[in-house]
Image (tube, rainbow, N blue to C red):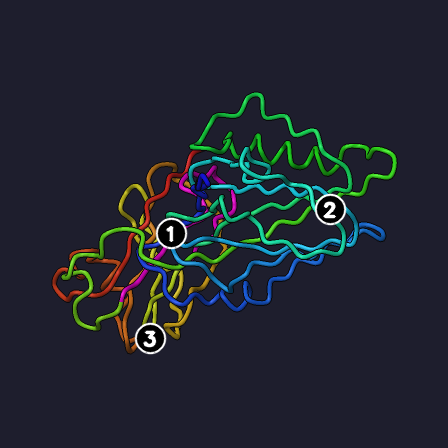
Amino acid sequence: MKRTVSKLGLALALLLAVSLGLAARAAALEIRATAGDFKVVFTPLQDKFKVGERIDFQVRGNKDFFLYLFSVDAQRSKGYVLLPNKFQQNSYKANREYRVPEPNVEFFSRKPGLEKVIMIASTTKLNLDTAGYAKSGDFLSTAAADLETQVKALSLRPAQPGQQTLTQEFELVIAGPDRKPPAPAAQAGSGATAFVSTDRTKYKVGERIKITYGADKAGFVYLFQVDPQGKKSLLKKQAVNGQGFLQETGQADAPAGRHAVIAVYDETGDLDAGEMMSKGIRLFEEKPRPHAVYQLEIVD
C-alpha cells in the first residue's frame, strides 16, 4: 500500500514550542457545524500534535456528505488541498464515524505553531476547480488568497436542489522544535527558552499584526519592537507560567522597512526596560538572557 504525506504549511515559526497554552482550546475543539437539519461533528484526535507526527481527525454527519479539507500557510502565502486527494475518497455515509485521513495517507506539519485548517462539508459534490493549482508532492497548492477566495465561493455559491453546505475554520496546535536550539550564550543563566513570531512576515501600514510569544519556564517576558532606524520600544511586559504561549494584537505602523520583534525572558521581572532599549542586543551579550528575535517587513 502506498503511503504519502501532506506537508502542511504553518503561519508561525517559533524557536521552541512547549506545552502550548492553546492546547486546552484544541482539546475542547469539536466542530459542530449545522445547516438546517444537516449536522457534522469534526474533531482532532489529540489536543495538540508534535512536529512530524501524524495528524488525524474523526468526522461524523447525520446525512451522506462530501468532505473537503484545506490548509493555509499565511507566512508563505500558500494554500493546500488536503482532501480530496488521489489516494482516498471524500464521500461519507450518514451516522457513521470515520477517521481522516485514511491509513495510506498522512497529514503532518514540519513546523511548530498554529495550523489553519478549513473544512467544508456538503450533501452534494462540489465543483472544486484545481486547474491552476501546482503539485506539492502528491497534493495540490496555490496562492493562499486564491484558495480562500475559492473556498468562500464554494460555500456561498447558490446551492443545487437539496444541497446543504457547511464551512468551518479552526487552528491546530503543533508543538516541537523547529530549528537548531539557540546558541548557549543566548539561553544562559535561567535555562529557559523564549520564543516569538507573528502571523505573517509582511504587512501594509495599518494592517493588524498578531504576535505569539512565551517561554518554557515560569517568569516574565518583555516584548520589544525595533524599527528600521534602530529605535526600540517596549510593547509588553507579561508574566508567563511556562506552560503555554500568549498572543497580542497590534497594528503595523510607519516607518516602512524591516522591523524586528524581540522577546526577552527574565525569571523575576526586574529587568530595566529603559537600559535594554538603550543598549539593545549588546545588553544580552553582557548579561546573557534567553531571548528570541523575529523579523518582519512593513510596506506603505
Q: In the orientation shown, which residue stands out farthest toward the front?
A: 1
Give SS at disc 1: loop
Few, some or many residues within 10 Å of mark 1 (<14, 14–19, 20+): some
Q: Position of residue 208 (x, y in %)?
A: 52, 47
At label 1, which amino acid type do we have? Gly
Circle 2 crowding by C-alpha within 10 Å: few under 14, some 14–19, many from 20 = many
Secondary element at tag 3: strand
Q: Residue at x 28, y 42 (%)?
A: 229
Residue 126 or 215: which is nearer the viewer?
Answer: 126
Disc 3 to disc 1, C-alpha distance: 30 Å
Per the image, the residue denoted by label 3 is 219
Magenta segment includes 214: no
Spatial separation of the CA atoms under disc 3 and disc 2: 43 Å
Q: Is residue 96 above or below residue 8?
A: below
Query: At numbered mark 2, what does the secondary structure look like: helix, strand or loop?
Result: strand
Q: For mark 2, what is the residue?
A: 166
Identify whether 14 is placed above or below 9. below
Relative side of 299 to 79, left or right: left
What segment is highlighted magenta in the picture?
A: 193-212
| Residue denoted by label 1 | 52
In-front residue for pair 206/56? 56
Predominant SS along the magenta part:
strand
Quarter of the image that includes the C terminus: top left
Q: Position of residue 240 (x, y in %)?
A: 39, 72
Cα–Cα span, label 2 and label 1: 29 Å
Task: Name, please, the residue furthest toward the right.
Answer: 161
